[in-house]
Image (cartoon, rainbow, N blue to C red):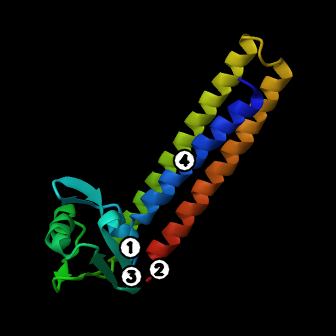
């Protein structure tokens, strides 16, 4: 492998690790209604599970309410069952065409738990980034042993991998801090 191939692989994998963190943080509840709370919920429709966003449009027209509009009105009951089964603390209210979820305000204790979860998710993402760094460094060492990279190229690759590691770790930290701030807002 060349230095560029190793760096490209490392950067793509780190980008995915941060992307996983972003989607996980979207599912963390803040004081406001957020479509991300139910977007990825699996709903059993037509005999197979499907993500909510594939079978309905999800919006938050008010800070305390999520509105789910199924593309097929026959799936309203299935969506209600999935929301209740997910035990998100929401009680779906349906008029047969639209489902409304009222998002109750969070207590201070629940907010602290959510912040703890945000920190856990951020740490998981940082660990993933560090593991990717380790794999990249191993690839550089292996390429140097096979004589496809010079010692200088290997060292340059390791330095650039470390720079990428710092960049993506700081991205993960920034995302987590922003989400913590949202969770703690009253």
Determine which residue is flagged by label 3: 60
Q: Is residue 151 above or below residue 7?
A: above
Determine which residue is flagged by label 2: 185
> In the picture provided, is 165 more to the left or to the right than 156?
left
Q: CA distance from mark 2 to mark 1?
A: 18 Å
For disc 1, the neighbor class at 10 Å (few under 14, some 14 to 19, many from 20) is many
Q: Secondary structure at mark 2?
A: loop
Q: Earlier in the sequence, mark 3 or mark 2?
A: 3
Q: Earlier in the sequence, mark 2 or mark 1?
A: 1
> In the picture provided, is 35 more to the left or to the right than 103?
right
Contact? badges 3 and 1 (CB < 8 Å): yes
For disc 2, the neighbor class at 10 Å (few under 14, some 14 to 19, many from 20) is few
| Labels 4, 2: front one | 4
Contact? badges 3 and 2 (CB < 8 Å): no
Of residue 135 and residue 66, the one placed in the foreground of this image is 66
Residue 17 point in image, percent of width and height = 53, 47
Determine which residue is flagged by label 4: 16
Determine which residue is flagged by label 1: 35
Residue 73 point in image, percent of width and height = 20, 76
How many numbered dots are placed on residues in this image? 4
Q: Earlier in the sequence, mark 4 or mark 2?
A: 4
């Amino acid at each position: 492998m060349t230095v560029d191939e190793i760096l490209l692989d490392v950067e793509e994998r780190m980008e995915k690790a941060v992307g996983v963190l972003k989607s996980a943080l979207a599912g963390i509840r803040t004081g406001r209604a957020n479509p991300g709370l139910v977007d990825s919920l699996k709903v059993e429709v037509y005999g197979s599970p499907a993500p909510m966003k594939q079978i309905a449009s999800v919006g938050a027209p008010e800070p305390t309410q999520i509105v789910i509009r199924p593309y097929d009105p026959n799936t309203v009951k299935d969506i209600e069952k999935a929301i209740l089964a997910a035990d998100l603390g929401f009680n779906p209210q349906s008029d047969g065409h639209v489902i409304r979820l009222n998002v109750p305000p969070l207590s201070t204790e629940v907010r602290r738990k959510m912040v703890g979860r945000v920190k856990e998710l951020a740490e998981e993402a940082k660990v993933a980034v560090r593991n990717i760094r380790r794999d990249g460094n191993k690839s550089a060492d292996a390429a140097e042993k096979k004589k496809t990279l010079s010692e200088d190229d290997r060292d340059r690759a390791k330095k650039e991998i470390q720079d990428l590691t710092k960049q993506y770790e700081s991205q993960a930290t920034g995302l987590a801090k922003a989400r913590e701030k949202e969770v703690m807002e009253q």
